[in-house]
Amino acid sequence: MADEWKLKEDGNLDISSVTGFRTVVIQDGAVVLQVKAATSPEHYPAGDKLEQFSLSPQTAAELGRDLLDAAQVLLQKPEGEMH
């Protein structure tokens, strides 16, 4: 699979806002990640999209580290400064 981003017709990222998530460990050794999202502002706060993903323990740990690293970049910026 190519490392491409999903884009809208105007070239901007096609993104949804996460409104909730939860995880569970299942017996076959996988971590299941459920993500609820709003595809547009009128769907706040409940969201209108639900996706569920099965991750290996290694992938779950890597995802957690990547999310933490990305959040730290933004949390360390002075207020009002964009990244």
Image (cartoon, rainbow, N blue to C red):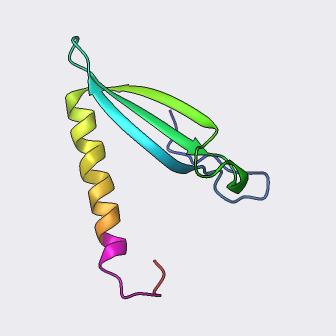
x, y percent for residue 71: 33, 64
- Is 71 in front, or is 34? 34
Name the residue at the top extreme. Answer: 28
- In the image, the segment drawn in magenta is 73-80
x, y percent for residue 35: 46, 37
**For the point 46% across and 27% down, which residue is it?**
52
- Image-based side of 46 in relation to 70, left or right: right
Give yes or no for residue 76 being in the magenta stretch.
Answer: yes
Give yes or no for residue 77 being in the magenta stretch.
Answer: yes
Q: Is residue 72 above or below residue 46?
A: below
**For the point 61% across and 36% down, which residue is it?**
49
Q: Quadrant of the C terminus?
A: bottom left
Residue 58 image-quadrant placement: top left
Q: Is residue 57 above or below residue 2?
A: above
Q: Main secondary structure of the magenta part?
A: loop
Q: Is residue 26 above or below residue 33?
A: above
Name the residue at the front extreme. Answer: 46
- Is 45 in front, or is 73? 45
- Image-based side of 18 in relation to 39, left or right: left
**For the point 36% across and 88% down, which residue is it?**
78
Residue 69 image-quadrant placement: bottom left
Q: Is residue 50 above or below residue 38?
A: above
- Is 28 in front, or is 62? 28
